[in-house]
């Protein structure tokens, strides 16, 4: 049996005392100031090697910002990683500013976590902070590995974002006994088709309507332009992101859990999806471009892996224009406005999203056959 790593970021709510909160806040501000200090140096010298930065700035970080040894190391690694990301992605060289009070924590050095308590290193030493355990029980069964966490303060509330990793058995393709095609879209968030010919639609219209409401509210606040309106605008954006993440969690859970282990889920390769959605009309662009396709796919992938299933991404081109019955491809087969498909050759008709899911499922079967050769 092959092995695979599954990584999930969990969000834990902390419940510190006022004194603990003050000590953590003091540490976060010192950490942010230190990051900006190092960032200015990297921007001016273009030296982003952690070893080089350690020789030049480690002592300053300890003395000027009262950072402990591991905190200073984390600052250097955090800043270097951000600039490395700029270079790797081909973005123009620009100075990075750390505005949010956040603190990167190394497991078993800056923090530790048990079922009872969260222990964190601050400027004035370690403190032990209680946290909300509900929903976290599964991550303390000994099979999950905790990674470098991020301590976050949002409007007076404390959260810990931790990437946790688990090694799972990766189902082999010869063991697959079910293939499911998954088409992601706007009218239907997801449309599935399996080997039994069953189709399941996950409606997207209510989600699209709510995103449209957020868009209009955002536009109204932008026109007001007052400081309070801008603060509310930010809160609304955060609320919308939380809501969309929750929607994707529920959809991915429902989708994966309805099928047994040893299932191959066939999804679309989303490379270039943003460019494609930006070609829609201006009045619909926000709802389309801001859609969380990639997030939903990532959730399907890790939940499938935990369930003993597997996901493969295939080229989605022409999946809505190709007839799954006679294999004829024709752009005229699909009526986008009416979301209908009618084959010009054999006359087969169905919903266009269902057709895409059917073709993705066919591509999954073809993928298994080709790998097995």
Image (cartoon, rainbow, N blue to C red):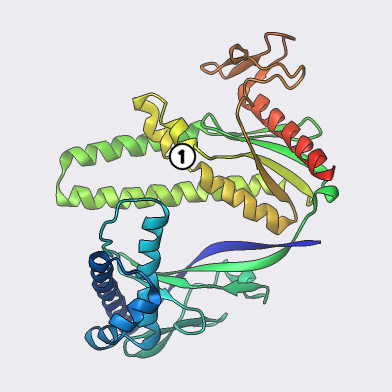
Q: Residue furthest left?
A: 226
Q: Residues within 10 Å of mark 1 (few under 14, many from 20)?
A: many
Quarter-of-image position of residue 358: top right
**68 or 231, nearer to the observer:** 68
Mark 1 lies on a secondary structure that is loop
Q: Position of residue 118 (x, y in %)?
A: 48, 81
Residue 155 is left or right of residue 260, and the answer is: left
Numbered-mark total = 1
Where is 266 relative to 138, above or below?
A: above
Which residue does the image show at 58% across and 51% down from the upper left?
Answer: 299
Quarter-of-image position of residue 255: top right
Q: Position of residue 78 (x, y in %)?
A: 38, 70
Q: Position of residue 364 (x, y in %)?
A: 74, 38
Quarter-of-image position of residue 283: top left
- The residue labelled by disc 1 is 291
Which residue does the image show at 38% across and 24% down from the upper left?
Answer: 281
Where is 14 relative to 182, above or below?
A: below
Which residue does the image show at 67% across and 24% down from the upper left?
Answer: 355
Which residue does the image show at 39% across and 75% down from the upper left?
Answer: 50
Q: Quadrant of the N terminus?
A: bottom right
- Residue 279 in sight from this viewpoint: yes
Q: Quadrant of the C terminus?
A: top right
Residue 151 is left or right of residue 199, and the answer is: left
- Residue 259 in sight from this viewpoint: no
Where is 271 relative to 127, above or below?
A: above
């Amino acid at each position: 049996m092959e092995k695979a790593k599954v990584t999930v970021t969990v969000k834990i709510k902390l419940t510190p005392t006022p004194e603990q909160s003050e000590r953590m806040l003091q540490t976060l501000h010192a950490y942010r100031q230190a990051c900006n200090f190092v960032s200015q140096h990297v921007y001016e010298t273009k030296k982003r090697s952690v070893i080089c930065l350690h020789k030049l700035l480690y002592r300053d970080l300890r003395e000027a910002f009262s950072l402990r040894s591991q905190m200073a190391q984390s600052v250097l690694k955090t800043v270097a990683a951000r600039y490395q990301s700029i270079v790797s992605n081909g973005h123009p060289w620009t100075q990075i500013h750390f505005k949010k009070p956040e603190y990167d924590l190394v497991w078993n050095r800056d923090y530790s976590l048990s079922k009872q308590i969260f222990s964190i290193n601050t400027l004035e030493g370690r403190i032990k902070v209680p946290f909300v355990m509900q929903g976290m029980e599964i991550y303390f069964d000994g099979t999950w590995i905790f990674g470098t966490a991020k301590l976050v303060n949002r409007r007076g509330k404390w959260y810990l974002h931790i990437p946790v990793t688990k090694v799972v058995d990766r189902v082999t393709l010869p063991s697959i006994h079910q293939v499911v095609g998954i088409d992601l879209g706007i009218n239907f968030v997801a449309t599935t088709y399996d080997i039994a010919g069953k189709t399941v639609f996950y409606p997207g219209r209510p989600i699209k309507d709510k995103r449209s409401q957020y868009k209009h509210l955002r536009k109204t606040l932008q026109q007001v332009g007052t400081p309070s309106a801008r603060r509310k605008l930010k809160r609304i954006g955060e609320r919308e992101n939380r809501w969309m993440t929750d929607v994707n969690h529920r959809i991915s859970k429902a989708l994966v859990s309805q099928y047994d282990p040893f299932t191959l889920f066939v999804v679309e390769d989303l490379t270039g999806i943003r460019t494609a959605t930006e070609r829609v009309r201006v009045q619909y662009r926000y709802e389309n471009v801001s859609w969380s396709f990639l997030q939903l796919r990532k959730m399907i992938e890790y939940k499938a892996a935990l369930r003993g299933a597997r996901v493969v991404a295939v080229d989605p081109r022409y999946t809505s224009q190709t007839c799954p019955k006679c294999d004829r491809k024709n752009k005229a087969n699909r009526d986008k406005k009416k979301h209908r498909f009618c084959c010009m050759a054999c006359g087969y008709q169905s919903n266009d999203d269902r057709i895409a899911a059917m073709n993705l499922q066919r591509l999954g079967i073809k993928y298994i056959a080709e790998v097995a050769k």
